[in-house]
Amino acid sequence: MDLLIFPLYNKDTCSLLLRIPSSTNYDCFKRNAQRAKWLIQLLILDAQGKEQVKEGVTWLLWYLGVVYNDSFIAVACNLSLLLAPKGMDAESACTVWEKENCPM
């Protein structure tokens, strides 16, 4: 009997130690994530159902996008995802309009 693995309320199993294999490149990372399912296990640890797993993914992506902004934008562009532009303050908007000779 493995004392570090126990059943969760949703009939999944959980381990107190989450083994995350090291990867030398993206293909190895993807294969390790699919084979070991460590990323899914990480999300299930904090979730109380499938909707909360989705919410956890959203939070994780949000956090990674804030902390690693340049890498996040590069990956989003490589995936052909559209990113919403940042908002423009009123002063900057007026300057742009004035440069284009458009009266306000």
Image (tube, rainbow, N blue to C red):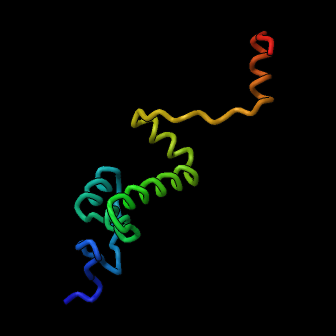
Instruction: Please report the residue visible at 57 percent of the width from the left and 54 percent of the height from the top.
Output: 67
> From this viewpoint, which residue is outermost toward the top?
101
Position of residue 102 relative to residue 44, above or below, is: above
Residue 51 position by quadrant: bottom left
- Front in this rendered view, residue 36 or 22: 36
> From this viewpoint, which residue is outermost toward the left?
1
- Horizontal and vertical percent position of residue 104: 80, 16
Which image quadrant: the N terminus? bottom left
- Horizontal and vertical percent position of residue 59: 48, 57
- Front in this rendered view, residue 21 or 72: 72
Instruction: Please report the residue visible at 79 percent of the width from the left and 23 percent of the height from the top.
Output: 94
Residue 11 position by quadrant: bottom left
Residue 18 position by quadrant: bottom left
- Horizontal and vertical percent position of residue 71: 51, 46
Count of residue discs:
0
Q: Is residue 46 left or right of residue 40?
A: right
Q: Is residue 45 left or right of residue 91?
A: left
Instruction: Please report the residue visible at 22 percent of the width from the left and 61 percent of the height from the top.
Output: 35
Position of residue 94 relative to residue 16, above or below, is: above
Instruction: Please report the residue visible at 38 percent of the width from the left and 55 percent of the height from the top.
Output: 54
- Horizontal and vertical percent position of residue 70: 56, 44
